[in-house]
Amino acid sequence: MKKRRARKRCLLLLVYVTLLLLLLSMLLQDDWWTLSNNHSAEEHKGRLEHYPPRLCPSFNASMWENEQDNEEADSDDAVSPPPRTHVYLHATWRSGSSFLGELFNQHPQVFYLYEPAWHMWQSLYPGDAESLQGALRDMLSSLFRCDFSVLRLYGGNNLTTAGLFGGRSSKSICSVPFCSAGGPREKVGLVEPAECEKNCPARTLKDLEWECQRHPVVVIKDVRLMELSVLRPLLRDPGLNLKIVQLFRDPRAVHNSRLRSKRSLLRESLQVLRSRLRIVDPAIKAQQQLQLHRGGADYLLTGALEVICQAWIKDLLLLHRSGPSWLNKRYLRLRYEDLVLRPRDELGRLLRFIGLPSITELEQFVMNMTRGPSYSSDRPFLVSARNAREAVSAWKERLNREQVRKVEEACGEAMSALSYKPQEDEQRT
């Protein structure tokens, strides 16, 4: 009898311990804890909570969990800010980033660098985009501090202003005082590359560093940073006053533009798509490699766009779910469609965010650049005056139904989060 009671007690104790361990495991699950205690599932009505899980990429919020808001982080008076403001224009290929960057290129208080990471990607080809992110971040850290020696690692020891990508269109390089034969820096207007090459001899990177240090604002535009989270160390660097402007565009318009400049984008699309091969399963990896080699140009462009759209979702989730308030204060989201259809308002919003004074000539410039006679993608990498409404809706005439379907399938979550309606819904309205 005693043995039976002892055995019964042991069984009951074992059941209690099992239930206790099960309860603890539930409490340690982040999703359960969030739903039970923060009621975020009921309170949050945003679009990001309703995405189907098929395309939603893995998201790691733990990298920001120690970035708790405190008086030092939120107070502008706690630490004296550095004398220079640093701005990164976070965009992707064919999203209108060249036009956005040109607005800063025109401002006399801005030192503007156009896609400096192009040198890195060309030098390290055919590396995958993800593996290049750390080197890109280190390059940005140096360039924001007006240290251009890092460019020699990828462009050669004899690199000058003549070899910088986009240097012949730079107002800083092609104007007085950096170029004595150039026009005045305060004059707003596009630089003619042939005139700059003729009148402004090549200068050393040391000379360019001196010119960079003269300006209170340094702006870098690039399209090769895949995820915003990579910039976390720079955002928390007390030596930098970093702000981020992220530009989005309707993925269907991006795809339309990419198709018309596919030859120029094949190498970099391959580098983006190669990031998918960083997986453990050898069978899946072999299958994707086979698709990559057989797919052709259109497969490369469509596949790369899907990777880019998933990176967009990660950025939006980062800011929406786990981003501390100080991060949101340093971040501005911008849609290309809003910029070109309401240029004066969006320009004012940009300048206020960065702390730059408005300029009447610059306001007139942005109006003229978005009210051109027509839209043409024959010279897609040239900044020129275009008809904004045609630029926004050109994809509707140039993409067939199957092309639109593929983009909407690959980028549906990002489109929903950014308020881009599917074509069927647009046709109903």
Image: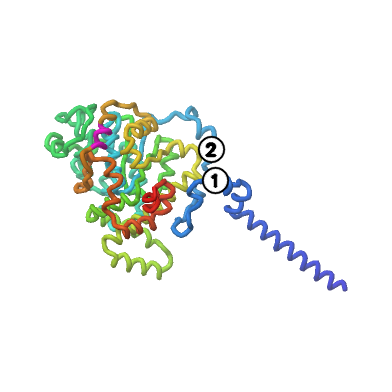
Residue span colored magenta: 365-371
Q: Nearer the viewer, residue 416 or 158?
A: 416
| Magenta stretch, overall SS | helix
Colouring method of the image: rainbow
In the image, residue 225 lies at what x, y percent? 35, 48
Which amino acid is tagged 2?
A: Asp
Secondary element at image label 2? loop
Residue 46 visible, this orientation:
yes
Tell which circle, 1 or 2, labels the residue nearer the N-terminal end. Answer: 1
Taking the image as shown, residue 337 lies to the left or right of residue 386, namely right
Report the residue marked by disc 2.
69
Determine if the magenta segment contains residue 75.
no
- The structure residue drawn at horizontal position 21% and vertical position 46%, both measured from the top left corner, is 376
On-image quarter of the N terminus: bottom right
Which amino acid is tagged 1?
A: His
Residue 214 visible, this orientation:
no
Taking the image as shown, residue 347 lies to the left or right of residue 164, namely right
In the image, residue 403 lies at what x, y percent? 31, 58
Q: Nearer the viewer, residue 344 or 276?
A: 344
- Residue 359 drawn above or below residue 372: above
The residue sitting at the right extreme is 1
- Mark 2 packing: few (<14 Cα in 10 Å), some, or many (20+)? few
> Residue 340, located in which quarter of the rendered image?
top left
- The structure residue drawn at horizontal position 25% and vertical position 45%, both measured from the top left corner, is 152
Report the residue marked by disc 1.
44
Taking the image as shown, residue 348 lies to the left or right of residue 46, namely left
In the image, residue 125 lies at what x, y percent? 27, 56
- Residue 95 drawn above or below residue 23: above
